[in-house]
Structure formats: C-alpha cells, structure tokens
Image: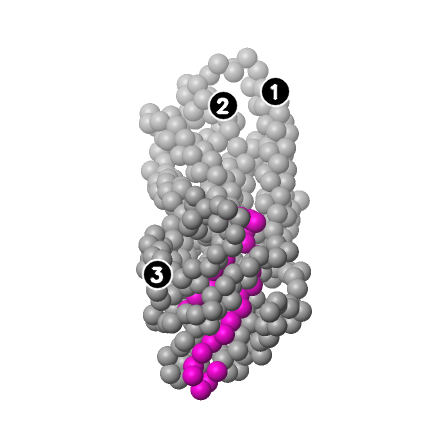
C-alpha cells in the first residue's frame, strides 16, 4: 500500500502542477506612459508574453492609432504585432515588427507572414503611417497608425516576441512554447476589449491532457509494472503475474489515449513540428504494441522457445522503459511547465531507483539462500527441471 499511495500522490501532484494557472507578476497597461504626449483611450493587458496594446479608434476615417508594448526574449531580440484579415493564426498576418539593428538603433518595419518559413518585408494590405519604435527599461514599443477597412471594428490580432536578429537586419524564428503559440485573439476596437481565442485555449487544454496521460502511462505505471515483475515474484508467486499484467495493460490503455491526443494536436497545429518528440513517440508506441502481443505469444515454461520469448519480452520491455522516460523529458521541454513539475518527476524516478536497488539486493539474497550451489543453471523457466528461472528477475 505504501508504494501505491506514493504513486497516487505523485500523479495528483503532477495534475495539479499542469492544470493550475500560471501566476504573472507584471505591470498593468494603465500605468504605462509614453513620450511626445501620446495618449490612448483604450488599453489591454494581453494574456501572453508580457505584452500590452494601447489604441484609439476613429470611426469616421477608420484609423487605428496604436502602441504595442512587449518585452523581447533577449535585449537584442524583437517584438511584433499584427492583424490577420482572414483567420485567427499567424499565417496570413499583416504585421508590424521592431528590433535592434547591428548599429544599436531601433527600427520598425512592416512584414507579411505568408507561412511559418516565409516572412516578406513590404507594404501591407492596410495603409500604415507614423510608424516608430523605441526601447526603454527592457521593453520595446511600436507606434503606428493603421487605416482599416470601412466598418471593421473587431479584428484578429497576433503578437509575438523573439530572441535573435539575423545579421542585425532581420528577425530570427521565435520559440514554439505554449505562450508563443497562444499569443493571438480578437480585439474589439469600440468596446475596448481583447478576447482570447477559445480554440487556442482548447488546444492548450489538449496539450496538458496529452502530457498527463503520457507521464502517468510511460513515465509512472510502466516502470512500476517492471518492478512488480522483477521483485514481487519472490514474495507473491503467482499473484505477481496478474498484478504485472494489470499494471502494464493499464499503462498501455492510458498510453493509447495519450497517443490519440497527440495525433489530434498534430492535426490542429499545421506547420508546427516537434520532430524528435514525435519520432520517439512513434518508436515507443510501436514497441509497446509489440509488447502487448507478448501476452498472446507466451509459450509454456517448459517449451523449447521459452528462452527466446524471454529475451524478446525483456528486451522490448526495457526498450519501452527507456524511450518512455526520455520522451517524458522531451515533452517537458515542449510544455515548459513550472520547474517544480520536472523536479517532482526526477525525485519520483530517484525514489523508484532507490527502491529498486534495495529490492534487488533482497531478491538476490533470497534466491541464493533458496538455491545454494545452483547459480550456474540456465536462466529460463523449466531448464533441466529446475525452478530457478522463476526466481530470476523479469521472467514471466
């Protein structure tokens, strides 16, 4: 019960850390002041990337006067704000971008985002005037006036920050963390409200669910199932076998759900790829599925092929174990949760490893006491009529 209760506590702690809202300690847009007596009627604290939007909207000539304020990822990075006339994402956005040039001056430019790999400098579909940029106290500001189509009082806004400027002349690619992917929404120019994109909130929720399912499956249940097979047999034979099968089938079932949410996320995130995480996931799921078949291909203990089945079962099992833990950490790099979450998983693995070392010593002590002088026997069940194989770790 002690191991079971500890696992439950760890799982609940992971879920709490993933699902709880991030706390943000930042200034409000209402406290921000600008030079040249620039005053704005409306302002919003944007929900991501420590960014703010200030604006006036003239409904007579459909002109939007704005100031976009954000903190670049690094002092020599860049910030951008834009309008997507046809969709809610990045592709198709007509953007204003500011960055520090190699000579140290701040410049603002207009760019069209035709795709994730095609950023074209030039005039936008909207007429932009009075464009200016400045840098102060670690924050960049873009000022501009944008002529909007008649009757356009609500727009799809997209904003972003980056860390590098290539050769001091053009911004480099931004991060693809949760904050960066969710930096979009609607802006109601008349009501003065910035509205988060509901579909993006749904995708963030799916990312968290995907992470939870796979941590619980491959990162927690599967290693525990291996420990049950390796050590519990010494104390509870044949009960260990049924507990082992139940644990690993539960792990696989939850893993299938995690795989499905990953496929759904991929279909919702065109142009965004986490290649190594995906490749490890494919290899992991393939090996795990192969391992499930081991249950149906399992020969009897005295069968001549039992030795080879043991090699196949143990080898694939260890492969799933290693790939699962590696991919959990790769997933953590993508989700970028609070550092406590990663630390909690490292502590869990350390505790599990410590328990395994203790049980390893106890198991071999018991095995050697039960079978003195027969340590050279073959390590698979039924060899020469010996039962020593039943005492060997991971023989099912």
Q: Secondary structure at mark 3?
A: loop
- Which residues fall within the magenta stretch? 58-83
The residue positioned 61% from the left and 72% from the top of the image is: 37
Q: Residue furthest bottom?
A: 60
Q: Nearer the viewer, residue 333 or 219?
A: 333
Q: Nearer the viewer, residue 205 or 102?
A: 102
**Where is residue 383 shown, x and y percent of the image?**
41, 21
Which residue position holds label 1? Answer: 369
The residue positioned 60% from the left and 69% from the top of the image is: 36
| Spatial CA span between label 1 and label 2 | 12 Å
Q: Secondary structure at mark 1?
A: helix
**Where is residue 301 shown, x and y percent of the image?**
40, 30
Task: Quadrant for residue 287, please give it.
Answer: top left
Q: Mark 1 Cα within 10 Å, few/some/many (few <14, many 20+)?
A: few
Q: Secondary structure at mark 2?
A: helix
Q: Nearer the viewer, residue 206 or 254?
A: 206
Q: Residue 388's mark?
A: 2
| Spatial CA span between label 3 and label 1 | 81 Å
Q: Earlier in the sequence, mark 1 or mark 2?
A: 1
In the image, residue 201 sits, relative to residue 74, either above or below, namely: below
Q: Nearer the viewer, mark 3 or mark 2?
A: 3
The residue positioned 41% from the left and 76% from the top of the image is: 147
Q: Residue 122's mark?
A: 3
Q: Is residue 73 magenta?
A: yes
């Amino acid at each position: 019960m002690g191991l079971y209760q500890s696992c439950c506590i760890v799982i609940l702690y992971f879920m709490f850390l993933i699902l709880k809202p991030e706390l943000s300690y930042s200034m409000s847009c209402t406290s921000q002041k600008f030079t040249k007596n620039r005053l704005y009627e409306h302002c919003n604290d944007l929900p991501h990337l420590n960014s703010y939007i200030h604006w006036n909207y003239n409904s007579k000539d459909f002109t939007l006067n704005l100031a976009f304020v954000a903190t670049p990822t690094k002092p020599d990075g860049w910030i951008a704000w834009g309008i997507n006339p046809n969709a809610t994402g990045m592709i198709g956005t007509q953007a204003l971008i500011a960055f520090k040039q190699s000579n140290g001056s701040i410049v603002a430019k207009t760019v069209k985002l035709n795709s994730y790999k095609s950023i074209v400098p030039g005039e936008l579909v909207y007429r932009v005037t009075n464009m200016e940029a400045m840098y102060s106290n670690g924050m960049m500001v873009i000022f501009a006036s944008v002529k909007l189509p008649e009757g356009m009082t609500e727009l799809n806004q997209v904003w972003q920050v980056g860390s590098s400027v290539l050769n001091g002349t053009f911004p480099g690619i931004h991060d693809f963390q949760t904050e960066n992917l969710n930096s979009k929404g609607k802006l109601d120019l008349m009501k003065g409200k910035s509205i988060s994109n509901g579909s993006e909130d749904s995708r963030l929720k799916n990312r968290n669910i995907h992470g939870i399912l796979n941590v619980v499956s491959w990162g927690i249940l599967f290693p525990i199932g291996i420990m049950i097979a390796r050590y519990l047999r010494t104390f509870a034979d044949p009960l260990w076998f049924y507990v082992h099968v139940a644990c690993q089938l539960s792990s696989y079932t939850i893993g299938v759900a995690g795989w499905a949410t990953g496929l759904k996320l991929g279909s919702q995130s065109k142009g965004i790829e986490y290649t190594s995480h995906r490749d490890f996931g494919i290899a992991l799921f393939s090996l795990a599925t192969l391992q499930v078949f081991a249950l149906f291909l399992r020969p009897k203990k005295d069968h001549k092929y039992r030795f080879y089945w043991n090699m196949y079962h143990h080898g694939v099992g260890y492969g799933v174990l290693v790939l699962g833990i590696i991919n959990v950490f790769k997933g953590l790099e993508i989700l970028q949760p609070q550092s406590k979450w990663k630390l909690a998983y490292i502590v869990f693995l350390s505790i599990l490893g410590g328990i395994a070392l203790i049980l390893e010593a106890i198991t071999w002590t018991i095995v050697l006491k039960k079978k003195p002088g027969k340590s050279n026997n073959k390590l698979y069940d039924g060899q020469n009529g010996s039962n020593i194989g039943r005492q060997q770790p991971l023989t099912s």
